[in-house]
Image (cartoon, coloured by chain):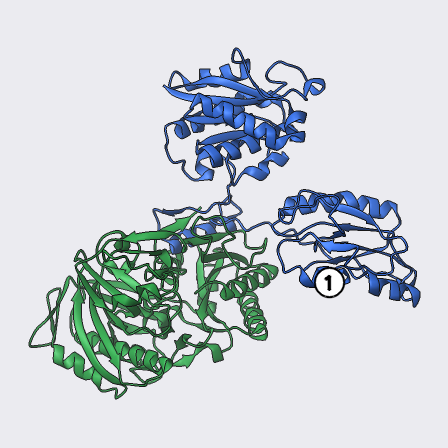
Chain colours: A blue, B green
């Protein structure tokens, strides 16, 4: 019988809802209903031998610490595989489940599986673990268990999973070679016939989803416009007070430049780890052109330079994160009456 | 336009006193073949060898592979512009020596020549492990420049293949395949209700040993144009390529263009195969824009409902592929692309250098970065020392025990982008 460890949050552990989301990780004395549902689906071939839970807030606020503790507990059970979730559309649970599944796989080398709704932010981990798409609420539990259990069994047995579209997990983006029944030219003609007939077909290579944004119409009168500076070039006040990461940034900073005529090497620097920082640190205006903007302001060529600039590091930062940052501060810019933004990169 | 391909099934090639075909065996007089090769004063010497399926033989570095054919009825001769005068081919009868190929090897030319293994792991990936291969190992005279050497080797193969094809001129084929290409008007009248499908065949033309020739013309100096599909079967398109072995199109694959074959197979049944557009893959942006504009314009002009677009090479030509796709889709013509991938050895990187949402139907020949371990084979034809320097290999790819650890990229036609093979990726 294969041994499986289950990771869940405080709600499914029966501890409580949002008001109990700050509980630290622990092993349950007895496995809960959700684990029992999986056991029933394994039909005696595998068993959940331990269920570990953690409060979603605790996990989000103490991610590294929580991960270490959870990994230690899982390691002690020596399982054949680990299931996390399903998290459905619960964002922080999805983040925790994806994180645990990815970490256990990477650090302990144990196969992992989780399940969540396709819009859950935890799906960011789909290249690092196997994620089964589920419905968006716990009403889809029965369906989720039915889909996840057979894959969990295969992983526990050490079997290689088939392609995502056959097995039903989310596209991982990790490309694997395989031999098809038909040669490529035949497959292309077959795909063409389906496409022409308006029938469903599966592309063999889903294009990366480049989120291309159509430019806005030009600013009507630039001499009246309030303009903001934003950068992914990592320009921050000296000392990097918000600790923006040099790579794979998890957040951005908002900085007041009221009265600042130009950036100096004494007061600003770059936090970016992806390029030679010498010239940016020597003269940070090279990346965030406050000096030139002030000139234009004085000359009446623009209305004004916005009081705040926003900065993050674009080095290896996931597109999903970058999009999230901008969606947030774009609202602030709008509320502040900013007419146009100059975005500088590196 | 009607072309009958008479297939003569070849089961073996042997050296003998007289060049002839008897039954399914091709006999070749070694001296006659050598004499043809040595007509070229830039070639110092040539060694001949035969590699058969299942033998413990490795051929490397492979330059081109050609299938011997002979035109027995109709205008012109095979490889027009090279071994025959320029005259429109593609009509009448052509005999094909099916099951054999002529393979050229020699000193390295452009770092992108390949490996053909006749047995073992590597044999799974190359179609030329299934053909009986006459191998020409060609040594140039001192001081010959690389592009001159490539040209000499290319011509030698075409001449030898033409000469071997001549042996089949009066042989009754074992099997006849008929390909009939309708004119635009005939197609509309015969199949008014079938979708009109074309083929955009992208030809490698980045220059500097990355060239393809059409009726003898260097494709990088051409505008996007049309070619009759049966012309391709008569050797109208010839490879002059030292692009990565896995996804360049050897002349053999052009002669047997699988997309053309598959479209003919469906013609009049599920679709109306309207025609083939050939377009190049030049390096300059203006050329890329012009060539893709013309592809889209011709697709629209022909009133096509859909086109299959096949690529050759990778990286820079990915932009040509996506430009063709975007512009053709924008004309309301549906596309299916055939490409291959460079997703890194772990498969985690972005596969293509360009992408677009319009490219929603893609067939892939697999990830060329995947690492393969090829066992030591008993015999090497060619020069094994180049394995470390060809694209897909690295310093140390050739192991002390004679085996090879390298990317799939090194294997000739392993990830072919005309859809010749069955390899794919997900």
* Image spot of residue A321 (x, y percent): 66, 44
Quarter of the image for residue B301 reads: bottom right
Taking depth in this image into account, of B163 and A76 the one nearest to the observer is A76
Taking depth in this image into account, of A194 and A116 the one nearest to the observer is A116
* Image spot of residue B45 (x, y percent): 20, 81
Q: What element carries label 1?
A: helix
Q: Name the residue under label 1.
A: A282
Is A254 drawn above or below residue B10 in the view shown?
A: above
Residue found at the far bottom of this picture: B41
Quarter of the image for residue A16 reads: top right
Would you say residue B386 is visible in this rendering? yes
Is A216 drawn above or below residue A178 in the view shown?
A: below
Taking depth in this image into account, of B314 and B161 the one nearest to the observer is B314
Mark 1: few/some/many CA within 10 Å (<14, 14-19, 20+): some
Would you say residue B77 is visible in this rendering? no
* Image spot of residue B157 (x, y percent): 26, 76
Say left or right for B360 vs B66.
right
Quarter of the image for residue A222 reads: bottom right
- Quadrant containing the N terminus of chain A is top left
Say left or right for B294 vs B250.
right
Say left or right for A112 vs A248.
left
User: What residue appears at the point 48 percent right and 37 percent down from the top-left corner?
Assistant: A106
Residue found at the far left of this picture: B17
């Amino acid at each position: 019988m294969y041994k499986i460890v289950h990771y869940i949050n405080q709600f499914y552990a029966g501890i409580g809802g949002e008001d109990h989301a700050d509980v630290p990780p622990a092993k349950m004395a007895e496995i809960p209903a959700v684990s029992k549902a999986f056991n029933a689906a394994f039909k005696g071939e595998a068993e959940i031998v331990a269920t570990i839970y953690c409060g979603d807030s605790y996990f989000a606020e103490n991610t590294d610490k929580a991960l270490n503790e959870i990994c230690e507990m899982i390691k002690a059970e020596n399982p054949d595989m680990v299931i996390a979730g399903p998290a459905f559309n619960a964002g922080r649970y999805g983040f925790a489940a994806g994180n645990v599944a990815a970490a256990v796989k990477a650090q302990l080398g144990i196969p992992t599986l989780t399940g969540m709704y396709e819009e859950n932010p935890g799906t960011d981990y789909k290249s690092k673990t196997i994620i089964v798409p589920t419905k968006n609420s716990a009403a889809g539990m029965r369906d989720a268990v039915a889909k996840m259990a057979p894959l969990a069994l295969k992983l526990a047995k050490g079997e290689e999973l088939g392609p995502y579209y056959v097995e039903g997990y989310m596209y991982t983006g990790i490309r694997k070679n395989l031999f098809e029944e038909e040669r490529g030219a035949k497959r292309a003609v077959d795909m063409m016939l389906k496409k022409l007939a308006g029938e469903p077909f599966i592309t063999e290579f889903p294009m990366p989803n480049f989120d291309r944004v159509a430019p806005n119409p030009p600013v009507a009168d630039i001499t009246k416009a309030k303009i903001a500076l934003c950068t992914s070039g990592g320009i921050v006040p000296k000392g990097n007070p918000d600790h923006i990461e040099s790579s794979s940034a998890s957040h951005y900073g908002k900085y007041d430049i009221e009265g600042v005529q130009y950036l100096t090497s004494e007061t600003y620097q770059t936090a970016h780890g992806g390029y030679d920082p010498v010239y940016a640190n020597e003269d940070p205006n090279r990346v965030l052109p406050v000096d030139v903007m002030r000139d234009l302001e004085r000359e009446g060529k623009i209305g004004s330079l916005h009081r705040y600039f926003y900065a993050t590091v674009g080095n290896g930062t996931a597109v999903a994160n970058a999009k999230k940052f901008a969606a947030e501060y774009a609202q602030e810019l709008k509320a502040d009456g900013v007419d146009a933004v100059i975005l500088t990169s590196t | 336009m009607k072309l009958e391909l008479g297939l003569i099934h070849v089961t073996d090639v042997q050296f003998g006193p007289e060049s002839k075909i008897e039954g399914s065996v091709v006999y070749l007089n070694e001296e006659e073949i050598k004499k043809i090769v040595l007509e070229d004063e830039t070639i110092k010497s040539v060694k001949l060898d035969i590699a058969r399926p299942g033998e413990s033989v490795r051929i490397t570095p492979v330059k081109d592979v050609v299938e011997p054919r002979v035109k027995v009825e109709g205008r012109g001769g095979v490889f027009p512009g090279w071994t025959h005068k320029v005259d429109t081919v593609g009509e009448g009868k052509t005999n094909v020596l099916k099951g054999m190929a002529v393979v050229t090897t020699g000193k390295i030319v452009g770092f992108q020549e390949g490996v053909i293994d006749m047995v073992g792991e590597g044999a799974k990936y190359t179609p030329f492990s299934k053909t009986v291969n006459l191998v020409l190992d060609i040594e140039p005279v001192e001081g010959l420049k690389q592009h001159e050497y490539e040209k000499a080797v290319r011509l030698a193969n075409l001449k030898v293949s033409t000469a071997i094809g001549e042996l089949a001129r009066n042989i009754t084929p074992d099997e006849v395949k008929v390909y009939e290409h309708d004119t635009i008007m005939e197609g509309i009248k015969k199949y008014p209700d079938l979708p009109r499908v074309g083929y955009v065949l992208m030809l490698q033309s980045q220059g500097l040993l990355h060239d393809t020739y059409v009726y003898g013309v260097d494709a990088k100096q051409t505008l996007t144009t049309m070619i009759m599909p049966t012309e391709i079967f008569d050797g109208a398109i010839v490879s002059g390529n030292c692009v990565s072995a896995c996804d360049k199109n050897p002349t053999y694959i052009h002669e047997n263009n699988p997309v053309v074959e598959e479209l003919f197979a469906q013609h009049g049944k599920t679709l109306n195969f309207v025609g083939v557009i050939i377009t190049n893959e030049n390096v300059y942006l203006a050329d890329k824009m012009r060539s893709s504009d013309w592809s889209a314009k011709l697709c629209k002009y022909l009133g096509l409902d859909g086109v299959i677009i096949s690529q050759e090479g990778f990286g820079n030509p990915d932009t040509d592929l996506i430009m063709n796709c975007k512009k053709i889709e924008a004309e309301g013509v549906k596309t299916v692309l055939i490409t291959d991938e460079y997703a890194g050895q772990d498969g985690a990187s972005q596969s293509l250098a360009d992408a677009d949402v319009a490219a929603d139907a893609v067939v892939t020949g697999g990830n060329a970065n995947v690492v393969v371990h090829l066992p030591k084979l008993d015999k090497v034809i060619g020069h094994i020392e180049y394995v470390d320097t060809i694209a897909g290999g690295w310093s140390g790819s050739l192991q002390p025990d004679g085996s090879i650890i390298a990317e799939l990229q090194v294997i000739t036609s392993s990830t072919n982008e005309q859809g010749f093979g069955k390899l794919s990726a997900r």
